[in-house]
Image (cartoon, rainbow, N blue to C red):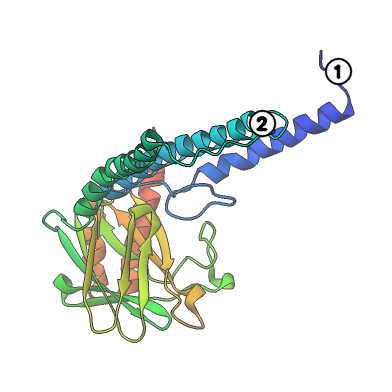
Amino acid sequence: MLRTGRPTTILAAALAATIAAAAPALAGTGQPSPWQLGLQGAVTPIFHQAHSFHAFLLAIITVIVLFVLALLVYCVVRFREEKNPVPSKTTHHTLLEVAWTIIPVLILVVIAIPSFRLLYAQYSPPPADLTIKVVGRQWNWDVVYPDANELTLTQIMLEPEELQPGQPRLLAVDNNAVVPVNKVVRVHVTSDDVIHSFAMPSFGVKVDAVPGRLNETWFKAEKEGIYYGQCSELCGLAHAFMPIAIQVVSEDTYNKWLEAAKTDLEAAKKVLQQASVSSLTSVASR
């Protein structure tokens, strides 16, 4: 029977602290969480598929690791020197050699099938409802709306003294790109100077921005909110200060924002603020 006392109390407190610390670690959609484990929460069909593939690979890897560990333990115990003073001189075993060649090949085939399916989905987008162009610069992003008379938003990272409550440090920007929820967004990505990388973790999107080249990706955000990413290429001195912010809103709010943004970005920001207030009021009244 376990006797209670100071060591047990300390152990229980340490366990409780570990569980408490793990709670935020497993959360996180749209931005990183302190002590985060695993991938950010998925809000697009592609990233849901990537999550499933990741879990599938993790299960396979776990089985392989446990199998190899069991073999090592068996060998250590079964073939230790005291039990086998005269070592075996066996050098070949046909069945074993065939098995350790065929089984890994079969495992790779099993992995390849969902992998190719995911790759096909990533690079075979459905018809787009909206197209935006993202241009990497040292060290900020320009988001262009070609269908809105080349409306351009320049995203500059907010300094610590400029942050509003709830805005994450090193990720919040002065002008969020805005897209409608549940719409297929085609993204053209390029660069004006050096190689950058457009990456939005919760969208499952990452594509290089290469000077003189137009790369393409897509996403379909299923949930409203503000989602953050960063340049994922070592692009120079201020690489760590080149965030991306995309705000997903309702289609009605998007249309109002776009109409206002064509003439006045500050008025467009007020549209987003009013929509946020209305949404919070609606939730509170339920």
Residue 280: horizontal and vertical position, in percent?
A: 41, 45
Badge 1 vs badge 2, beta-carbon distance below 8 Å: no
Residue occupying the point 42% across, 60% down: 228
Label 2 sits on a secondary structure element that is loop
Instruction: Work out whether residue 138 or residue 267 is closer to the camera in this orientation and state it.
Output: 138
**Amino acid type, callout 1:** Arg
> Which residue is denoted by mark 1 in the rendering?
3
Q: Position of residue 247 (x, y in %)?
A: 34, 59
Helix, strand or loop under label 1: loop
Question: Does the rendering let one see residue 170?
Answer: yes
Residue at (28% x, 83% y) in the render: 211
Is residue 183 among the parts visible in the rendering? no
Please count the marks in the image. Answer: 2
Quadrant of the rendered image containing residue 285: top left
Sequence-wise first label, 1 or 2: 1
- Can you tell which mark lies on residue 84? 2
Position of residue 45 measured from the top left corner of the image (x, y, whole percent): 26, 46
Horizontal side of residue 62 vs 286, given as left or right: right
In the picture provided, is 178 more to the left or to the right than 245? left
Between 132 and 263, the one lying in front of the other is: 132
The answer for how far apart the CA atoms under marks 1 and 2 are is: 44 Å
Quadrant (top left, top right, bottom left, bottom right) of the C terminus: top left
Question: Residue, x 30% and y 62% (percent of image)?
Answer: 178
